[in-house]
Amino acid sequence: MFVDKAKIYVKGGDGGDGIVSFRREKYVPNGGPAGGDGGKGGDVIFRVDEGLRTLMDFRYQRHFKAQRGEKGRNKSQHGANAESMVVRIPPGTLIIDDDTQEVLADMTRNGQQLVIARGGRGGRGNIRFATPNNPAPELAENGEEGQERYIVLELKVMADVGLVGFPSVGKSTLLSVVSGATPKIGAYHFTTITPNLGVVGVGEGRSFVMADLPGLIEGAHEGIGLGHEFLRHVERTRVIIHVVDMSGSEGRDPFEDWVKINEEIKLYNAELENRPQIVAANKMDMPDSEENLRIFKEKVAEVNPELEIMPISSLTRQGVQELMYRAADVLDSIPEAPAIEETADQSERKVYRAEEVEDEGFTIRRENEMFVVESAKIERLMKRMQLNTHEAILKLARTMRHMGVDEELRKRGAKDGTIVRIGEFEFEFVEGSSYY
């Protein structure tokens, strides 16, 4: 099965907690603080592996979570950093943030890698909080939480030449006779429901990758039929071979087929209109094909006189070798670059973002007899601080006092014993005190 789209959850490892510890060696009086910092959590890294061709692995595993860093140790020892989790993806994978729909990267080269979810920083041990005024602090931090997000992976087949055309025009048969690919072939519509790849050798050490892409129907650019499941793969191809059934065996007009397919491709992405295209006039071994080809050429000449039309028969192999040589020549004449003109490889593009400034604001609302304080800064501080010591509570109280929370609570009518809730914690307000 060919899987070309997947939604997964990734999370960087949490940082290890810092610890509170003191030196207690013999003959070392007043040894002082010795609690080490926690280790950094592991990153989640996506790396391109050219040995992969589909996103099948992500159908069975959808959650990727890196390990957390180790806790700090006594004797001022730093906890070990966690190893990064490396997730292998096939070349041609587009990585999109599911929440913002931002394209994070377009992974095309073997070995290319990107950090998708960063691990959290380790918490500081009490040795970091020692000051001349407080040489033996009983204060330490918890590790920072790792970054987490939902990611959508979209695979666009990496092929030099793409075969396009209506269903049952002979694309799969053509691929099977020019390469070692063995696509499923049958006399019914939508035989091909997933892209097939094959390597075509044309002698003199020249070869290229050709993809038989699923058939189109009118309205595909809007998602009708296979829709975008087909069209996304056309973007990667450098040359398009448009296969047209000249026999009219399906009761359709060859010229109208050609016009409709080109219109669908253009509506999906206007850049694709300028992609080099060769028309493969297929099924020339069938009755009426010669007359249909003559009419087809006359109509095309009025629209695009420079379009190259090559008569072939996938069944008898008439003209097939000449078509492959011509495709190789066209490939040699155009630069090797990502098919869609994205001005630069998105993975190399630098994106400058304004540095996030910590929100110093807060809101206070009343619920019955209780005040609820909401502040991103305070809640973040409470997650980091180990609030099981008197010093940690004092540090939190000082922060809130400097932010003006105390004064605002008094204005709202808080008195001794009033319950104040912040996040998951509840405190008693004490009038005139520096802490709750």
Image (tube, rainbow, N blue to C red):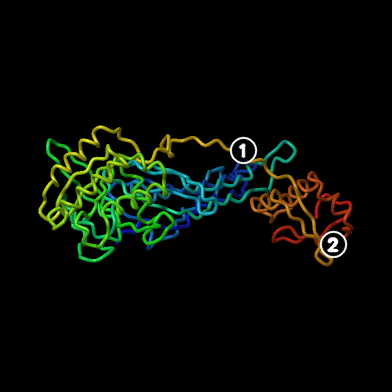
Query: What residue is shown with label 2?
Result: 418
Using the rendered image of the protein, determine whether residue 117 is visible from the camera's viewpoint. yes
Query: What residue is shown with label 1?
Result: 355
225 or 61: nearer the eye? 225
Q: Secondary structure at mark 2?
A: loop
Seen at 68% across and 49% down, the residue is: 381
Seen in the picture, residue 181 relative to 238 is either above or below; the reply is: below
- Looking at the rendered structure, the kind of residue marked 1 is Glu
Q: Earlier in the sequence, mark 2 or mark 1?
A: 1
Residue 53 in picture, x, y percent from top left: 30, 52
Residue 328 shown left or right of residue 436 in the figure: left
Seen at 18% across and 40% down, the residue is: 207
Residue 102 in picture, x, y percent from top left: 51, 47
The quarter of the image holding the C terminus is bottom right
Contact flag, marks 2 and 1 (Cβ < 8 Å): no
- Looking at the rendered structure, the kind of residue marked 2 is Thr
Which numbered circle lies on residue 381?
none
Residue 18 shown left or right of residue 174 in the figure: right
